Image (tube, helix red, strand yellow):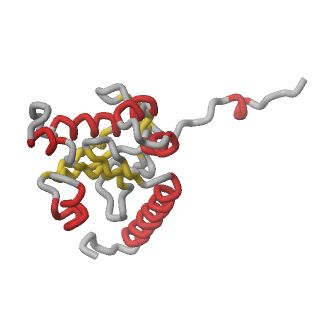
Amino acid sequence: MEEVSEEAAKPEKETYEVSRDVAGTLRKTDPETGDVELYTSIDGILQAVPKMNWDVAATWSRLPIMKVHLFIDRASYERGGMERSYASKVFPEGLDLIAAIAWWRKRIPVAAPGTAKAAQRAVAFGVFEGSFNAQVSATDPPILMLDASGEVQADDVEVIQRKHQSYVKRRELEKRWASKGASEEI
């Protein structure tokens, strides 16, 4: 029988902290890099956004949402981009996608069916910005766009991986600048 050394028998040291959000989402934070990964129910996301692809839901279930931009309709966003939002909300700790969608839906005007206001409800539009470290990033964030009718357009796995690589490169660049004594203003 093989003999196992004491060092090999010790459990691997965890280099991250796991906590549970108020809403029940697990949050894994790496203390060295600040990277945050959420564990949100994929089924819950698919119930909130039935038209979302399962693979996209699986990817977005792990990203904290840092900002939501509210628009009257998709055309307002397409005409002027983020500057055309009538309101934006920053979630300082990052929020799971289900909670962020619930927050957005509470702000969609409600009206009696068959009225002009009810037709307006169907055109409400939101842009959700994800993050890799539960902070607003200097790099291009993952984006998910959702309208009140349930139509969704989101960055897929490949795009999010590319944006994560850009985020990691930026983080390394900031470390190099800090080690050289460069000021924050640069």
Residue 28 position by quadrant: top left
Q: Position of residue 141 (x, y in %)?
A: 36, 58
- Relative height, residue 172 to residue 156 (above, below): below
- Relative height, residue 138 to residue 98 (above, below): below
Name, please, the residue furthest toward the right.
1
- Residue at the spot x=34%, y=73% of the render? 181
Residue 31 position by quadrant: top left
Q: Position of residue 60 (x, y in %)?
A: 43, 44
- Residue at the spot x=38%, y=52% of the render? 153
Q: Camera-side residue: 117 or 37?
A: 117
Left or right, 35 with respect to 126, comes to right
Task: Give the position of the N terminus as an image quadrant.
Answer: top right
Instruction: Give the mark count.
Output: 0
- Relative height, residue 178 to residue 121 (above, below): below
Q: Camera-side residue: 31 or 74?
A: 74
Residue 36 position by quadrant: top left
Q: Position of residue 41 (x, y in %)?
A: 43, 30
- Residue at the spot x=37%, y=68% of the render? 178
- Residue at the spot x=18%, y=50% of the render? 70
Task: Give the position of the C terminus as an image quadrant.
Answer: bottom left
The answer to whether residue 37 is seen in the rendering is: no
- Relative height, residue 18 to residue 56 (above, below): above
Q: Camera-side residue: 31 or 152?
A: 152
Q: Camera-side residue: 174 or 69?
A: 69
The answer to whether residue 4 is seen in the rendering is: yes
